[in-house]
Amino acid sequence: MRTGLAFVGTPEPLDYGRLFSRLRWRRAVAAETEADLDPSASADGAFAAAEIWAVVLLSAAVPWGKLALSSLPSGAPALAGRLAPASGASAVHTLRELESGAHDLPASAGPPPLLAFRIADFLPRPGETVTAFLGRVAAAHPAALPGGLAALVAGDPSERERPELIERLPPGGRRLADVGCGSGATGAALKRRDPLLDVTGIEIDAAAASRAAARLDRVVCGDAASALSALALEGHRFDSFLLGDVLEHTADPVALLTAARSAAEPGARLVASVPNAGHLSVVRDLTLGRFDPAPAGLLDAGHLRWFTRPFLAEALEEGGWSVYSIDGIGSEPPPGEQEFLDSLAGWPGLDPALLSVYQWIAVATA
């Protein structure tokens, strides 16, 4: 029987990260044909090319394991498991660590990353769209996939409040620029703490900006440096700035920091966080010849710049800011952390503590 792998189309273009995610799904699911599904198209025609299908519902998830579609039992659909990135014991930070299997990741609630079925068990109905058909199949008491294929799902980090950033912005601020606000959860938390705080979000992703608009006082959708420069020209000034995991996504971090400086009141405070390019997981992968883009985290495919503590300090100073502090924040240890640290014992000039820093958080003033 002919097998097929399908991806549900989205309005967003297939960027660098999504293309890599597709490649990983192809390697995890061996299929004879591949299709891009238009959600509004007729299901009858969309699934005509194969008898057994695996449909990727979350293309940005990272699959773990293999699926032989020919082994799929008949009578019921099957779902891939959904895994959370970390547990209390260890965290997976890179694709190589996921592939190693040396971890015990917990299950995660939410939409399944992949749905597999035999078309003979769920014949499309006349006029049924791809979306309606997949919804009907997914509701038919699905089982777990044979072989245990699962996928790591990062979710939207901007939907989570960032207490480690909030605590570095003192109460009593009046006007905050939340640069790269995403869906706006942290800015909204600051507004709850300080009811008089006016928060302007800046976000380049239109969907995230729309979600943030329901939480913040206003949201500017566009490039961060250009938006800040335009606000400054219009006479807007801010006494605080939040750049949570933004600088690494910009081609010119100094230009962004300079634009923020142009919109800053005297004595304004800026809080910025960036992932640590010298984290143990990244360093270890490099020693093994690996550097794999991922949907999120240390090796996010959207990262254009890479920061150590000294480089973050230099970027802030070049942007016109005076560095007050830069602190390292840890995370759950990756699998095999201690064994790798033991192997580096005696390395001249090595500070093992730097390898455990997941993020650098800087506080600077104008």
Image: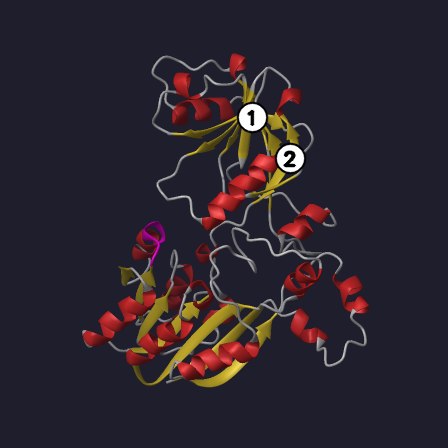
Instruction: Please report the bounds of the magenta region as a residue range.
Output: 204-208
- Left or right of residue 24, residue 176 in this image: left
> Which dot marks residue 149?
2
- Left or right of residue 171, residue 81 in this image: right
**Quick check: 172 above or below 63?**
below
Label 2 crowding class (10 Å Cα cut-off): few <14, some 14-19, many 20+? many
Q: Quadrant of the N terminus?
A: top right
Residue 60 visible in image: no
Estimate the x, y position of residue 180 in percent, counting from the top left: 38, 63
Q: Nearer the viewer, residue 343 or 110?
A: 343
Which corner quadrant of the image does residue 30 belong to?
Answer: top right
Q: Residue at x 44, y 57 (%)?
A: 158
Q: Nearer the viewer, residue 65 or 251?
A: 251
Residue 108 in magenta stretch: no
Disc 1 and disc 2 in contact, CB within 8 angstroms? no
Residue at mark 1: 116
Q: Label 2 amino acid?
A: Leu
Q: Quadrant of the C terminus?
A: bottom left
Dominant secondary structure of the residues highlighted in magenta in the image: helix
